[in-house]
Image: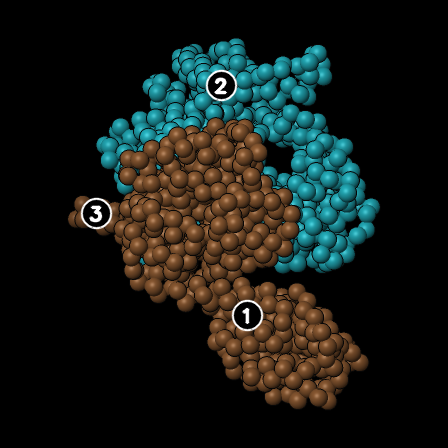
Chain colours: A brown, B cyan
Amino acid sequence: MEAKKKGLNAVKIVSFLCLLVLTVHLLDRTMIAKYMDDEKEPQTKTYKGFYHMEKDSVDVLILGTSHAAAAINPQDMYDTAGIRAYNLASSAQPVWASYYWLKEALKYQSPSAIVFDVNYLFRDSHYETCNRKALDDMRLGSVKYAAVRTAVATDQSGKETALSYIFPFFRYHSRWSSNLNEWDFDNSRTEVPPKLKGFWYYTGLAHYEDFTPLDVSTSSEEAPFVETSFSWFEKMVDLCQKNHIMVIMIKTPTHRFTVEKHNAVQAYADEKGFPFYDYNEAELYHASGLDYSHDMDDASLKNAHLNPSGARKISKDLAVRIAENGWANSCQDDQWELTKETNENLYKDFMLQHTEDIATYFDMLKDDRYTVFISAKDDASAGMNDMVKTALSDLGLTVDWSDMYRHGYLAEIDRENVVYEKVNNKRIEYSGSFRDGVMRITMSSAGYESGNQSSICINGVEQSRNSRGLNIVVYNNERHCVIDSVCFDTCATDMKCVR
Amino acid sequence: MSIIAAFWNGIMSYTAWSFFVLTAAALIVYYVLPRKYQWSVLLIESAVFYYLASGKDLKSVLLFVATIVFSYIAGRLLERKKNRALLVVSLVVTILPLLLVKGNDFVWKRVVSGGIESLIIPLGLSFYSLQIYSYLYDIYTGKNNAQKNFLKYALYVSFFPHIIQGPIPRYDKLGSQLYEGHAFEYETIAKGFQLVIWGFFLKYVIAERAGIIVNTVFDHYTMYQGAFALLAGILYSIQLYTDFLACVCMSCGVAEMFGIRLTENFRQPYRSRSVKEFWRRWHISLSSWLRDYVYIPLGGSRKGMFRRYLNLILTFLISGIWHGNGLRFIAWGGIHAFLQIAGDLLHPVSKRIKHLLQIRDDAFVERQMDRVVTFFFVMLAWIIFRANSLRAGLYMIRSIFTVYNPWVLWDDSILGLGLDWKNCVVLVFAILLLILMEHIQEYSRTSVRERVMMQPLIARWTVYLMAISVIVVFGVYGYGYNASDFIYRGF
């Protein structure tokens, strides 16, 4: 009897401990930082998605920093040459993190080649945020534990603990007071097969004109590698050689790369017999069709990321080279076949964000992924021409713009259906919801004489440009974020675009 | 291998994961072993805990061991021969390291040039010195017998749940519990677990959160005056209480899991109706120690009013010195002595006034008024206690009475003290929960813990898991917050 009671108590304690672990796990999953489609760098999708790939279905792995994540689009590689690639690059990814991600990836995939961006062979930095972005979504196991130990060992402040990497709530629990959002409460949306295979859409357009491709004949000097980074890279090379994986070294375009750095990498690559594709080098730059003034998202002193236009050029060029050299086989795979449309849609979003012609813009708004909000300020009718009126009419809007001088105007088009439209010479206000009631919208519009104002607030955040003419905000219902906010000055005949 | 290294290399405390791993392992072994050997598990865990909690500082560990050896021998000798000189020597040697440490800044550095630069301060010195003192004294008076087994005696002194912050035990109450062994009881484990959870809640949801505002104001007391100082004083009173109570809850909870009940150390002190009553409810193990080994030996209240008050003043000055080595601690002790004497002297007057105004002493409003007034004076004394110097403390108290700025409590100024509005809401709700719990403890015959134990299993577990979730999410801990160690550990 006594033994039975003791046994029952032991079962109770063990059961409670199991529930406790489950509770902590659920809290951990909720509180951990998530970087999803509404972010420039959807890191969470990159790594969580990787684990959803079919075993041994990825032939090329891409590793490196955000330069690589924004430069190589696996979907474009597949569409070009049937190369099945996955991009595991992350923000300021230290070379040790690249090494551990390669090691982790080899548990699930048997790639024939890796593509490594050499950016961090010349740097060694410790950014806690970037380390966590790289490691948070790696599955628990010996590889993660080793990576965590490395991350903690490189922390100069001594504040980071291994425990906080293993149980991220130690680091993120205070998010409850600042930035928990819808991604945190809907696990089904983070645990989905990846559509972009780790590629990041940096959708800016830097218009940087001062870039000159490198003439590598101007110097034979070699810049030194950073020792710690290089030693981790050598470990990576060893791992690749043990697994018969070809190492392809690349450098994406950046005005910060130098001939000396190029020479150092080229010398190493020659010694090892690895290919090195430096897209800063004049010949390759021109051959791939790159145009720095149109293909970069940003080109500041700190960063240089390609936008999808530039990424498409590099990805295609690289895919052809990999296929031609036989470093990976061309094949057909549903995992990439089924995501072609997504890639094209995202490319369309990117194009929309940079379209300045009003008629083309309205034409592009005919898309069942979008919810479009329009609010007029001052006057939106004086400069209207028939082409624009037709484009608006094609969207389903019915207002006659001929007698609307300095009127307020509001419209909402949800997935190609006009759900609200009103014009008045007084101030107009509208409030409602969209995306199945999840998102709140309040809009107002007032012509010059009734308040001269435009407002489009989505979930309490003002999105309108509040400029003269038609202010337009486009919300993407698949990515769950605002993808564009623009104003066309339809009061003037040139209908200038303001972003 | 690396987990063991992390365990071994970290500094252990009552809130460290390594402490709970160690304790869980010890619990399993403890209940597997026959009862007569169980105490050896406690001794081993105490030794490991002490070594790791003191940062593997061998010098301080050796000093601690030397103290145990000395007091063990002294105890045995005192038992054989009740010699007053031997007692005095034993007590002086026992208390000497504590006097050196407490007097270093205040006396030695002022009187003797430079003081002692590199004192070895063993962990828990303030607590185990008093513990050993009472042990030896009680042997001399015949209240206790000396423990003959050295290892058992070492366990009594070093028992890990109380070594850092008390409660200060008495041998007659703790000794036998340590050595007799205990059968495994689910209820014992569950009740201990409840206390540990409550301790975590107090520490991380209330004390650490309140500490953010407290630190901001006290560290910039010339900037934050008037209502800010009052708010900081109130919050510090709550922070100190919850922080200390948290540690005691964890100590008692862990000890209870081993079947050992430690001395009660708090009895809802802020519900006291006088400062005198406050000291019957606050840090009970220290107040009773001071009563038994300082106040009563000095003559207590047996030698007339003047001597009674003098003894009271001396006792509280000693209490002040025990708490810290600065003038402000002595001032704090003095204030409490003064408040008690004033309360005593004014008692007939207040009684007369109440009689004239026909105010019943047990009326609800009267009880609450007494509590508020008592809390207010205790809070003023805590300001001196917490301030960076006596001068700073007096400056803050003066500003409470001279700077009129109550609007800062409503115009969002307090949101600039380090907590956003959401954290302020959590703090307020947590304090209200504490008040509710104290109310139930005060007036109900059944304790909150027993009430929880009476619920069905699912309800109990739901409460536990919800409490843990609240602590995990709303606790102030980890990188990003600078969670401090337990405040009383520093005394």
Res B5 → quadrant: top left
Query: Residue, x 78% and y 78% (percent of image)?
Result: A448
Crowd around label 1: few <14 · some 14–19 · many ≥20 (10 Å): many
User: Which residue bears the numbered disc 3?
Assistant: A7
Which circle's residue, 1 or 3, is located before the other in the chain? 3
Disc 3 element: helix
Nearer to us: label 3 or label 2: 2
Disc sitting over residue A475 in the figure:
1
Q: CA distance from mark 2 to mark 1?
A: 65 Å
Q: Amino acid at mark 3?
A: Gly
Query: Residue flagged by tag 2: what amino acid is it?
Result: Ser
Chain ID for label 2?
B
Residue A446: where, in percent of width, then height? 73, 79
Sort mark 2 into few (<14), some (14-19) or many (20+) by Cα contacts within 10 Å.
many
Image quadrant assignment for residue A188: bottom left
- Residue A241, numbered circle: none
Percent across and percent down for residue A338 are: 35, 65
Q: Which residue is mark 2?
A: B60
